[in-house]
Amino acid sequence: MIVDSALYRDGTREPVTLHEDVLTKFRDTSEKDAFIWVGLHDPGEEEMARIATMFGLHRLAVEDALSKRQRPKVESYDQMLFIVMKTLWYVDATDQVESGQVSMFLGPDFVLTVRLGRGVELTTVRHDLESRSHLLIHGPTAVVYTVVDRIVDCYEEVSEELETDVDEVETSVFSPGRSRDSQRIYILKRELAEVRRAVQPLRVPMQRFVATDYPFLNKEASHFFADIADHVIRVNEQVEKLDQLLSSAFEAHLTMVSVQQNEDMRKISAWVAIGGVCTLIAGVYGMNFAHMPELHWSFGYPLALGIMAGLSFLLYRAFKRAGWL
């Protein structure tokens, strides 16, 4: 559905009613400092087709805007610039990163934002932009900058949450107690891959935004996009660093598990050896032969028990000194 639509003239908002010839009438006025911003959320095919006819959107770009499986990209068409970005947010209860999608159609005098799923709520973005008229004078480029900036800020928030989780995993891996961190490490690496899929494809387009190589971009907005490009690079580097830390933590976890298993086997072997001495003596005296030394001696039984206890104690002390127990 259409969430909001407005005409912006000289940095101020004016309501606009969308109809088939709204853009034609608007362009006939030859207003250079005015543009239309239409925001849609989960539009249907019929509604999107009506908007596409109204603004002359390319058919392939419209199909991509309705698909949730698009990768982040920037494509240039004759009459417009098409931008796709993933929106990310973090769910602390499950250590998961969920994603949505925002598509933008940028023309000389219009900008359309199409939001699929949850994620960045563009109504607040619009209100923030309307409170900064010095940005609105840059035309549709101001909308692109503000929306992209908010989405990239969410990337940074997600990466900070993931960094906290990675720190917790490292602490757990190297803690003295036993831990089962392999499952959480796998989940975090999968979520980092989700962030990487959203951020990494933006590095080159953001650099081109800085140079305003794309059509319909205001040259004066270059330094604004430079700030966003820097944030994108920082998030990408942070994600790579966290992924490396998780790989190292997983290797350390496997090493700790192996060490713990070796310690368990040494303890088991030590107790088996101690029990084996008693079993040996009991086995010898348990043989039913008629002629055995000390078989009818009154001190034979206490002596056998004493030998068992003494040898077991000596073995216990030996294993204790060796660190096996």
Image (spheres, helix red, strand yellow):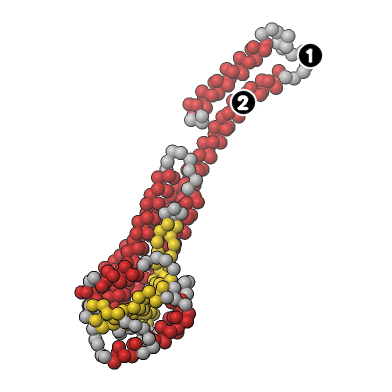
Tell me the SS state at disc 1.
loop
Q: Give coordinates of residue 53: x percent, y percent.
A: 42, 87
Q: Nearer the viewer, residue 79 or 210?
A: 79
At label 1, counting other C-alpha atoms closer than 10 Å, the crowd grade (few under 14, some 14-19, many 20 or more) is few
Of the residues shown, which amino acid type is indicated by label 1?
A: Ala
- Asked if residue 223 can be seen in this view, the reply is no
Left-right relation of 232 to 194? left
Question: In the drawing, what numbered circle is on residue 275?
Answer: 2
At label 2, counting other C-alpha atoms closer than 10 Å, the crowd grade (few under 14, some 14-19, many 20 or more) is some
Q: Is residue 250 above or below residue 303?
A: below
Q: Are marks 1 and 2 in contact (CB under 8 Å)?
A: no
Marks 1/2: CA distance? 27 Å
The residue identified by callout 1 is 290
Q: Is residue 9 above or below residue 265?
A: below
Quadrant assignment for the N terminus = bottom left
Q: Is residue 276 above or below residue 131?
A: above
Q: Give coordinates of residue 32: x percent, y percent.
A: 24, 86
Q: Is residue 65 above or below residue 183?
A: below
Left-right relation of 72 to 224? right
